Amino acid sequence: MRMLVVGAGATGGYFGGRLAQAGRDVTFLVRPARAAQLADRGLEILSPDGNSVVRPAIVTAAELKQTYDAVLVTVKAFALDAAMDDFAPAVGEETAILPVLNGMKHMDALVARFGGHTVAGCACKIAAQVDREGRIVQLAPLPKDTAYGEMDGRATPRMRALDAFMQGAGFSASLSPTIAREMWEKWILLAALGGITSLMRGTIGEIVAASGGAAFIAAFLDEVVSVVNAVGVAPSKPFLDMAKATLTAKGSSMTSSMYRDLQAGNRIEADQIVGDLLARGHKAGLALPLIATAYAHLSVYQARAQTKV
């Protein structure tokens, strides 16, 4: 199997780097500046499990000519349109596109562009970021896992081949018959954590310790889950128990990547993580005052950030 990894940021860099390190046939599709950086220094991973430098195969959009068995799409949601143009030559009739973007809006865009047969489901978990030197920094030993599968749950030959390809590369990998539910569950946690920490401007522990904080968290999570129950795939009870425990843990230093980007003045995925959820919920006739408040708050930040560009 041959895999094209679109992007070499925190997610793509870590999982693609580990696969390359394990001897898998992996090529990174990156912008010219990132290509030059990787060619000069290699792909550096700083991890509690041990640091490493990989010198993977690299290609730019102008050089991409051949198709791949799998395309792992790891760009930010606001970069998806440009990325689809870039990796389109890599998509053949049996190529599996594996997107690990946030939310579910990207699935509609990918299916519209490449067809439902081509687009599979994928969900990655990794606590990592890219530092100023372009290195992939894993922030904690766990989580570092990925799940994938056909959206209808079938164990097709291409998914079985992908599963064999992903095993034994230094992270947990699983072929899931319920990948659609797992993707909706991931969105629940992202939207809840992002909305809660960004709106309250604090860590989970700080919010829980504040007067009314725990009640606010519970109410926000209930709104998010109500949307997914109405328009998506209902989450499992074990997931909900985990989500509630995670979001109400006393003393927790957890924040969302959205909140960290907001603090740093970076572009955020407010539309994809919170705005699209709100739109789907309103279309289903749900009243969502807390999600609406969070989205308005994030929209003010986005508009202000765009005026500075």
Image (cartoon, rainbow, N blue to C red):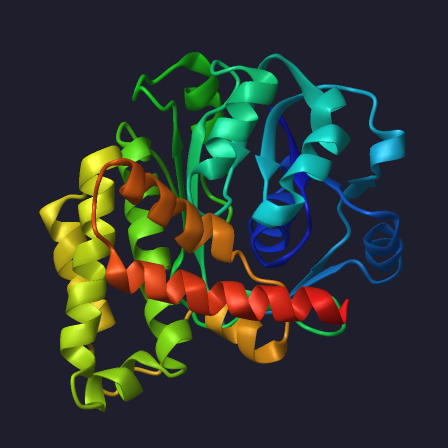
Residue 209: x %, y % from top left: 21, 90
Residue at image point 37% right, 57% down = 190
- Where 245 sits versus 150, above or below? below
- Tell me the quarter of the picture where residue 112 sits: top right
Question: Could you tell me how many numbered marks the image carries?
Answer: 0
Residue 114: x %, y % from top left: 59, 18
**Quadrant where the C terminus lies?**
bottom right
Residue at image point 67% right, 72% down = 131
Extreme residue toward the top, this view: 93
- Where 104 sits versus 76, above or below? above
Residue 122: x %, y % from top left: 43, 37
**Viewer can see residue 135:** no
Residue at image point 22% right, 90% down = 210
- Tell me the quarter of the picture where residue 80 sits: top right
Residue in the foreground of this view, choosing between 96 and 285: 285
Residue in the foreground of this view, choosing between 73 and 159: 73
Relative placement, left or right, of 58 versus 287 is: right
- Tell me the quarter of the picture where residue 74 sits: top right
**Quadrant where the N terminus lies?**
top right
**Viewer can see residue 71:** yes
